[in-house]
Image: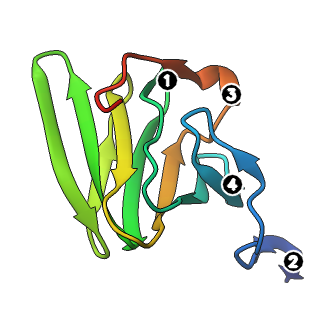
Amino acid sequence: MLSKANNLDFETKHLPRKYDVIAPDGSEIRLLLTMKGGSMVHCTLPPHKISLAVRHKTVEEVWYFIEGRGEVWRKQGDQEEVIEVKNGVCITIPSGTHFQFRTTGNAPLRFVITTMPPWPGEHEAVRVQNYWK
């Protein structure tokens, strides 16, 4: 739902019940809002699932986890790590970083993603070698 006040474009949107698209990594994406500097989505990876490993060509992201438990693998150059994620954890995905994530519990892994600049389309994500099979 969009609302307008004082002739300015203020946007308000509630989280959609159904996902809008499946991301190039295989996760469920619910589109939220976009402005010229960035976009925001809600991401869900169902229980016992592993995303596909990808890297982004031009965008950088901030992820904030709100539900579930999981792990995220990130690699850029010689720097590589696997971190545990759960409610309250926030991470960055710099441009060019190879990454993959998985759920480690019986609940879906849910997080909010801010993408800067806004997500340009499917061509942005490039498949890389999986860390987890």
Kindly report which numbered mark, 3 or 4, lies closer to the viewer in this rendering. 3
In this picture, is 10 found above or below 104?
Answer: below
Distance between the alpha carbons at the discs numbered 3 and 4: 16 Å
Q: Is residue 43 left or right of residue 85?
A: right
- Neighbour tally class for label 2: few under 14, some 14-19, many 20 plus, Cα within 10 Å: few
x%, y% of residue 14?
73, 79
Up-down relation of residue 58 to residue 85 (above or below) = above
Q: What kind of element bears circle 2?
A: loop
- Which residue is the site of mark 3? 122
> Real-space Cα distance between discs 3 and 1?
12 Å
Q: What x and y, as percent, mark residue 16?
A: 76, 72
Side of 44 where 73 appears, left or right: left
Circle 4 sits on which residue? 34
Mark toward the start of the polypeptide (4 vs 2): 2
Chain-order first, disc 3 or disc 1: 1
| Closer to the eye: label 3 or 1 | 3
Q: Is residue 59 left or right of residue 64?
A: right
Residue 128 x %, y %: 41, 17
Q: CA distance from mark 4 to mark 1?
A: 17 Å
Residue that numbered label 1 is attached to: 58
**Lower sequence index among marks 2 and 3:** 2
Q: Mark 4 is on which residue type?
A: Thr
- The amino acid type found where label 1 is placed reads Thr
Rendered view: 63 above or below 79 = below
Query: Alpha-carbon distance for marks 4 and 2?
Result: 14 Å
Q: Which residue is mark 2?
A: 1
Q: Amino acid at mark 2?
A: Met
Secondary structure under tag 3 reads helix
Of residues 81 and 77, the one nearer the viewer is: 81
